Image: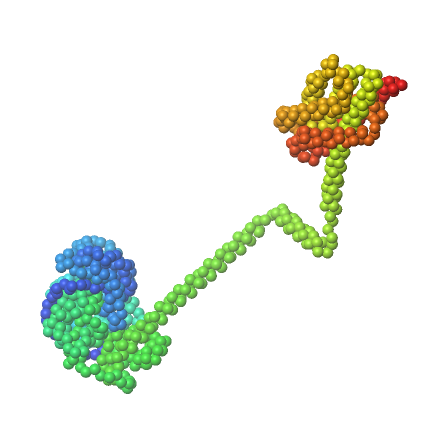
Amino acid sequence: MFNFLSRLRREPIWDFKGGIHPPEMKSQSSGTPLTEIPLPKQFVLPLKQHIGHEGEIVVSVGDSVLRGQPLTFGSGKMLPIHAPSSGVVTAIAPHITAHPSGLPEIAIFIQPDGLDRWQKMPVIIDYRAQERAVIVERIHQAGVAGLGGAGFPTATKVRGGLKGVKTLIINAAECEPYITADDRLMQDYAEEVLEGSRILGWLLQSEKIIIGIEDNKPEAISALTHALGDAQDLVIRVIPTKYPSGGAKQLTKILTGREVPKGGRSSDIGVLMQNVGTAFAIKRAVIDGEPLTERVVTLTGEALSHPRNVWGRLGTPVEHLLNFAGFTPHADQMVIMGGPLMGFTLPALNVPIIKISNCLLAPSKAEMGEPEEEQGCIRCSACADACPAGLLPQQLYWYCQGGDHDKARAYNLNDCIECGACAYVCPSNIPLVQYYRQEKAELLAIDIEAQRTQEAKARFEARQARLEKEKLAREARHAAAKARVTHVEKDQVNAALERVKAKNATAAQSVTLTEGVEPDNSAVIAQRAARKAKARAYQAEQQAVESDVDSRQAAVAAAVARAKAKKAQSQSLTEEGRVTADDYDSQLNAEVVGVEAAIENSGAVAEDPRKAAVAAAIARAKAKQAAQATEPTAEPEAAARDEDPRKAAVAAAIARAKAKRAAQTTEPTAEPEAAARDEDPRKAAVAAAIARAKAKRAAQMTEPTAEPEAAARDEDPRKAAVAAAIARAKAKRAAQTTEPTAEPEAVARDEDPRKAAVAAAIARAKAKRAAQANASHHSNETSQPSSVSEE
């Protein structure tokens, strides 16, 4: 005891401005040891139980979980939560949470199985042999947050103070009335509290570890002193009881005499503060491997028959805890989570306790007194005198009520610790803390929106800078490429540009000519004239061919007429006794053969000459056979001489014509097929011309002499004309029926039909001229004997 008192005398104690001394009301619950309570029927675990964002869910409905099993995961300020007991996840849905607004948040519902099986983390016996980062990560994975009421993630706070922290303060003041959770924890678990404090001191490498505790907790002070013994690594400092001496800035001023700057933190002056419950949770997480699944909760108030401190599992409904302490509600009963000055009234009793829930107060009407109506401010300045943060609560009240956010910010509203001292001393019963909380929420929303705007502006400016940089880079590349162009390349480029300009000028000139001047169409007119001349030449050729055919038909008709005249003359000579019947028959046969040859020659031009020669030979043979068959014997010869020779000749000619038509109908077209197989049409045309020439010469050899012509001149001209017309008609029909299309076929095989037709016409014309020359020559040779016989 002497050593303890001597240490107290050596360490000075400071005071802070303001503060109040309300009734403590701690004796109701501090005298009973910590108690375990039965498991509730259902746990409700909100995802967010700390300052920061909620973690990501890693379980699903229907999953079986163990106590200490992570239900969420995250990093930084995203602390995980753990199952408070073994059981089954029954739902993941919104549920009302421990907040003054009473708004629902996403929560995980677990139905316990009563076995309470653990899933612990690996135990670290000697934490000093580990890296500090490993221990900090273990604290984070255990989900440890500030259990004094703020709920700031402990691992994040420790990471921020790994450098520059010289003094570690363990806050054991617990200054608010009714709350005795830390007091009871220090009485029952003093050694574990000290061990957790040493772990924090080792992590921060602090020079001094101070445990600050109010003098209204003698049992806790005795337990800590006994547990500390002769150790010199920690210092226990007992401070006077004053509200709110448990505030971070106020306790720092009391123990160190230094003030935290406005808008700053205690770490800015080399000080870091942690709660007694937080130190205990760190010891359990690091050394025992137990995540944060429960905390000490004070159950107090005159509405409870057995007020005490209990181990409350996180997610346990408030109603279950109050019923365990003998809750007897009255009309208009209120339940406050937290103390009477900094707590808030719960909207319902099914709200679950969370990591920052340190007290449940169920006061009676006598304790709370009659509610008084809010009145106007009388400017008494009692709130300013009681404010431990050195603010002007009256001015802040006006700015918050009038919505003047800039003035509220200028008067350091965010430095308010919401201790409620101003509202406690206000004679007008103005709930100043409620106004401050509402204004803080609005300022936070404004800051978030401003931050988003700033981020959007930064993104826009970064994009503009990037685009400008890319533009400059492109211009630099273009300039470099332009500088690399040589004089030759420039000349080539200029020449190309000149060509383009000339082309554009020509196009513009052509457009101008089209609009104002008639174009030169001489080439088109010349082509049109050439096509017309070619058409006229083709028409003339066709007419020449037709006239050639008509001339051949006329020649045949004349030959027939001459033959008839010859026969008439022979008949008259026979009657006069100048010639015999045999001579008559031989002459008649010769004339008929000559007529047939003339008919054959008339069609030789149009048809295949070889085919025409074969047909002519067949016809002559048939005629000869017919003459032999019809030749009369000795007696019939006299009758034949008495018979009309013209009728016999006509009958024989008809028979020969029928035989010829039958032969032409059934004769195979071997030669046209052979010609069709010929690949070269020009060779076929030449062969056809040669054949026609040969046929023409054969016809000239068989043409009758001038004697029948002389006989034809002595004949009746009208009969001769009629006979010639009949002969022409028959020859024309025969030619139309039997004339083969060798020449058109040859033309069709030629690639250019007009050229083939012109070539065929030229060949026929040449053949005709040769035949006429031969005929005139032959007639000149035979004219002299005829004249001699006539003479």
Between 241 and 140, which is closer to the camera in this rendering? Answer: 140
Q: Quadrant of residue 775?
A: top right
Between 559 and 689, which is closer to the camera in this rendering? Answer: 559
Quadrant placement of the C terminus: top right
Q: Residue at x 76, y 21 (%)?
A: 643
Q: Position of residue 747 (x, y in %)?
A: 67, 32
**Is 192 positioned to the left or the right of 402 in the image?**
left
Q: Position of residue 85 (x, y in %)?
A: 17, 59
Q: Is residue 314 visible?
A: no
**Is 349 positioned to the left or the right of 744 in the image?**
left
Q: Is residue 322 above or below residue 473?
A: below
Q: Residue at x 85, y 25 (%)?
A: 714
Residue found at the very far bottom of the displayed protein:
378
Between 48 and 25, which is closer to the camera in this rendering? Answer: 48
Q: Quadrant of residue 334?
A: bottom left
Q: Residue at x 30, y 80 (%)?
A: 397
Q: Position of residue 363 (x, y in %)?
A: 16, 76
Between 168 and 730, which is closer to the camera in this rendering? Answer: 730
Q: Is residue 302 visible?
A: yes
Q: Is residue 240 above or below residue 137?
A: below
**Is 616 positioned to the left or the right of 293 in the image?**
right
Residue found at the very far top of the displayed protein:
634
Q: Position of residue 309 (x, y in %)?
A: 13, 69
Q: Residue at x 25, y 63 (%)?
A: 93
Q: Quadrant of residue 34?
A: bottom left
Quadrant placement of the N terminus: bottom left
